[in-house]
């Protein structure tokens, strides 16, 4: 039995016709140029498609997002978050907030309600309740990120209590307590 020669890509020869290769290239180029020439949708079509996207974006709210702040409450919460962010007395993100809660720091937790998957923040309210920290949900992670002086959407923020914004902090604390009832 003669030894078989191992086939490598260089030894495998497929019969290709130069004309068929050129024909395939031309058809691919024609498809690409036709997709570029497609007309833009009209302004009405754009508006309807963008409103559908916005409606889908606003529609998602985690089933865990209770107590959820109303629109008026959300505006006042985000206003307080902005003040606290200027004072640098704020913890941003799940990792920092969980660390602060485990160290028994006091404050108020603001949690975004549109986080997906919800497993990312599911444990935060439990930690808050164990440590006696008030928490409330706001509808938008992007609004929470803007208020907390970051460019990125933020899922959780913890506000630490300071005298410089004490009155706003106590109002927010009362709001959280009333929302839990």
Image: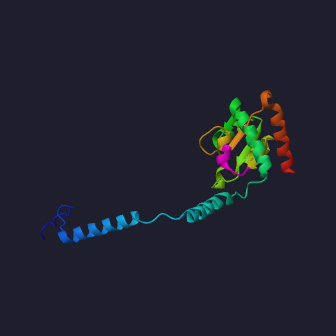
Q: Residue 149, relative to residue 53: is it above or below?
A: above
Is residue 2 a member of the stretch shown in magenta?
A: no
Q: Residue 20, relative to residue 90: is it above or below?
A: below
Q: Which residues are magenta?
A: 138-144
Give how far across and how far down residue 126 sits, in percent: 75, 48
Give how far across and how far down residue 48 sits, in percent: 60, 64
Is residue 103 in view? no
Q: Residue at x 32, y 68 (%)?
A: 30
Could you tell whether 87 is left or right of 29 in the image? right
**Quarter location, residue 78:** top right
Could you tell whether 123 is left or right of 12 in the image? right
Q: Residue at x 76, y 45 (%)?
A: 75
Could you tell whether 1 is left or right of 50 in the image? left
Quadrant the N terminus occupies: bottom left
Q: Which one is nearer the viewer's eye here, 164 or 120?
A: 164
Q: Residue 41, relative to residue 107: is it above or below?
A: below
Q: Residue furthest left?
A: 2
């Amino acid at each position: 039995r003669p030894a078989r020669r191992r086939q490598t890509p260089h030894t495998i020869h497929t019969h290709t016709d130069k004309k068929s290769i050129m024909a395939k290239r031309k058809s691919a180029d024609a498809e690409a140029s036709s997709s570029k020439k497609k007309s833009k949708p009209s302004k009405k079509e754009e508006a309807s498609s963008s409103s559908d996207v916005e409606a889908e974006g606003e529609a998602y709210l985690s089933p865990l997002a209770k107590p959820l702040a109303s629109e008026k409450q959300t505006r006042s919460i985000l206003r307080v978050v902005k003040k606290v962010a200027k004072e640098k007395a704020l913890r941003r993100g799940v990792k920092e907030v969980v660390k602060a809660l485990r160290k028994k720091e006091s404050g108020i937790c603001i949690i975004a309600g549109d986080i997906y998957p919800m497993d990312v923040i599911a444990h935060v309210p439990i930690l808050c309740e164990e440590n006696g920290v008030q928490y409330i949900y706001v509808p938008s992670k992007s609004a929470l990120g803007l208020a907390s002086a970051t460019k990125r959407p933020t899922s959780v923020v913890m506000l630490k209590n300071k005298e410089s914004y004490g009155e706003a902090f106590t109002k927010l604390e009362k709001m959280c307590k009333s929302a839990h009832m």
